[in-house]
Image: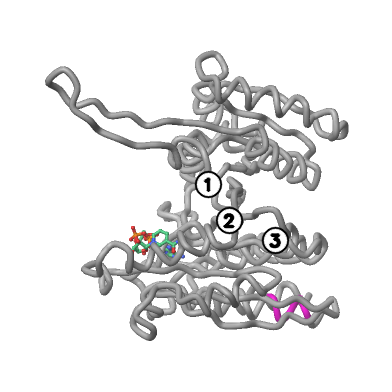
Amino acid sequence: MQKNIAVIRGDGIGPEIVEQALKVLDKIAEMYGHTFVYDDVDMGGCAIDKWGDPLPQVMLDKCLASDSVLMGSVGGPKWDGVPGPMRPEKGLLRLRAGMGVYSNNRPAKIWPQLASASPLRPSIVEKGIDFIIVRELIGGVYFGKHETEEQDGQLLATDTMSYSESEIERIGRIGFETARKRGKKLCSVEKSNVLDCSRLWKKVMHRLAAEYPDVELSDMLVDNCAMQIVKNPAQFDVIVTENMFGDILSDEASMITGSIGMIPSSSLGATTCGLYEPIHGSAPDIAGMDIANPIGTILSAAMMLRYSFDMAEEADAIERAVSAVLDAGWRTGDIMPSDAEEVAACRKVGCSRMGELIIEQIAK
Ligand code: NAD
C-alpha cells in the first residue's frame, strides 16, 4: 500500500524525534511491503524564519493533500517576542482548523517497565493503565461567546457553552469506532445532572449505541471520572467527552503514566487524514543534544498506522518493539529511574540510538 505523509519536523527537538519515527516507518514499509512517501512541511518557528508566516497556505495545502500528517513539535524562546497571530502555536491552531480535526485522542498507557515513574501507588498501577481519551476539539465553551461587561457597578464575565446534536454525534462515532478497535468499552463522560449540553450529549450517545451493539457503553459524571482516573484507572478502555472536560481529564491521565516523552496523540476529523504528534513541546533546553526521547513520536506514527491507514498489525509491531526495548533496560535520560537498584538494571542511550534499538527489535 502507498501512503503520502506530510512531515512537520518543526522546532527544538522536533527534527531529531521525527527522524527516528521516519526510520521506524521505513523499516515497517520494508517489512510489510508498503511505500511511505514523505513531503516536508515547514510550520512553526522555522516557517516564520523562512517564510515570515508560521503556516504558509502552500504548506497547509501540502497537509490537506496528504493521507496524514506526522508532526514533531513547534515553538521556542526565539519566537517568544513575535506578535500574537504570527506565533508558532498559531500555525498549529490553523493547521487543526484547516484540517477540520474535531477529535483529539490521547492514550494514557503505563508501560510496566516504567511503573515506578507513576505518582500512583504500586497497588493501583499494577492493575494496569491503558485507556484512551477521545476529546471533542473544536466546539463547546472554548468556542462559545466570551464577554466581560459592566453591570450594576461590577464586572460580569460570561462564557457560553453550546453543542449541536451533529457535533456530538460526530465525536461520539469516533469514540465508538475507537472502542471497536480496542477493548470495546466506551465510557461517556458528562455533567448531565447540571448541564443541558451534557443531557443532550448523553441522549445522543445512547442513540448511537444502538448502531454499535458490540461496544459496551457506560455513563460517568465528570467529577466522578476525575476521581476514578486516580482511584481505579484499570476500569477504562475508551473515554469520550466534550472539549473542556477532555482538556482537563487528558492532562490528569497523562500525569499518572509518569513521563511526557512517552505519550503520543492523534487528531481526527471527518476523513481518515489525521494529525499525529507527541503531547510534549519542543523542549528547547535539550534541543540538538541527541538526548530527547523519541518514543512519543514513534508511538504517534504507530497510531497513524492503526487509525488512519488501517494497519493494525504494523502498529502492533512498533508497540511490541518499544516494549521489548524497555524490557531490555534501554532508557533515554527522561525515563531513567531514580532508585539506585533500578538504575543498575538500565542502560542510558540517546535519541538516535533509541530509534535504532526499536528498528532492530522490529526486524527480529
Ligand atoms: P516541553 O514539553 O517542551 O518541555 C517540558 C520539559 O519536558 C522540559 O524539561 C523538556 O526537556 C522535557 N521534555 C519534553 N519532551 C521531551 C522528550 N521527548 N524527551 C525528553 N525530555 C522531554 O514544554 P515547554 O518547555 O513548556 O515548552 C517548550 C516550547 O514548546 C514552547 O515554545 C511551547 O509553546 C512549545 N509547545 C509546543 C507544543 C506542540 O508543538 N504541540 C506543545 C506544547 C508546547
Q: Residue at x 45, y 73 (%)?
A: 55
Q: Horizontal placement of 260 versus 166: left or right? A: left
- For mark 3, what is the residue? 319
- Quarter of the picture containing the N terminus is bottom right
The segment highlighted magenta reads 25-29
How many other residues sit within 10 Å of disc 3, few (<14), some (14-19) or many (≥20)? some
- Quarter of the picture containing the C terminus is bottom right
Q: Earlier in the sequence, mark 3 or mark 2?
A: 2
Quadrant observed for ligand 1 in the rendered image? bottom left
- For mark 2, what is the residue? 265
Report the amino acid beneath label 3: Glu
How many other residues sit within 10 Å of disc 1, few (<14), some (14-19) or many (≥20)? some
Q: Is residue 263 above or below residue 201?
A: below
Report the amino acid beneath label 2: Ser
- Which circle, 3 or 1, is nearer the viewer? 1
Q: Earlier in the sequence, mark 1 or mark 2?
A: 1
